[in-house]
Amino acid sequence: MEFIAALAVIAVLCIVFRVSADIIIIGALVLICLIILAMTLFFAVSFVFLITSKKCKAVFERIDKRQNGRFRSAFYRIGSENYPCLFPAEPKFVYKSCKNCKVRLNRRRGFVFDKFAAATCIFGLLFSIAAAGGAAWFAVCIWRV
């Protein structure tokens, strides 16, 4: 929310200082392209973590906040250790308590990918690549004009 408020203040300041509308629009488009590229990079790194993780059998334990996290995550028990899922938890009714399931464990980073996190990672990467391609195509079309 603060991000949108900061953008509104910047836009008002640009108008007050009589910055051209074309420059404001180009700046907004550049900002959108940077956000899309950051999103693509995030999902690409997450996908690398996903494919380099090891398949393991786990038991769903609970949904709780991680130690330094802002969002609630699903926790899985593998052996005697509990590992959080990388992405935030889905609604609670999706998980079955004390049920064996297969997850992908990244021991070095200390998190797992459950089936929901894997789907989020794969679809997020595909859609962000498509968005980045669309943004690049739009930029080329605008540049020609």
Image (spheres, rainbow, N blue to C red):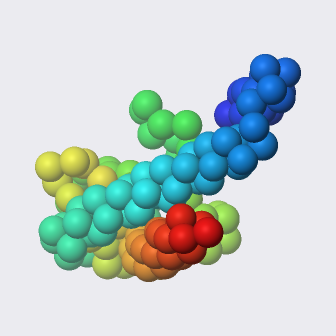
Image height of 40 relative to 67, above or below = below
Instruction: Answer whether residue 95 is visible to the viewer in this image.
Output: no
At 22% from the left edge and 48% from the top edge, which residue is drawn?
109
Q: Is residue 54 left or right of residue 95?
A: left
Q: Is residue 8 left or right of residue 53?
A: right
Task: Name the spot of residue 103 as percent of width and height, x first.
Answer: 31, 72
**Quarter the N terminus occupies:** top right
Whether residue 84 is visible here, answered yes or no, is: yes
Q: Quadrant of residue 79?
A: bottom left
Tell me if residue 139 comes above or below residue 42 in the rendering.
Answer: below
Q: Residue at 80% x, 26% y: name it.
A: 18
Q: Residue at x 67, y 42 (%)?
A: 23
Horizontal relation, residue 100 to residue 119: left or right: left
Report which quarter residue 61 is drawn in. Answer: bottom left
Decide which of 62, 110 is in the foreground and name it. Answer: 110
In this rendering, the answer to whether 86 lies above or below 136 is above
- Taking depth in this image into account, of 33 and 92 the one nearest to the observer is 33
Residue sitting at the far front: 145
Residue 77 % position (x, y): 32, 59
Taking depth in this image into account, of 17 and 83 the one nearest to the observer is 17
Q: Residue at x 43, y 31 (%)?
A: 68
Quarter of the rendering containing residue 104: bottom left
Where is residue 99 drawn, in percent x and y? 44, 75
Q: Quadrant of the C terminus?
A: bottom right
- Asked if residue 73 lies left or right of residue 5, the reply is left
Q: How many marks?
A: 0
Instruction: Provide residue 13's location: percent of width, then percent of height.
Output: 78, 22
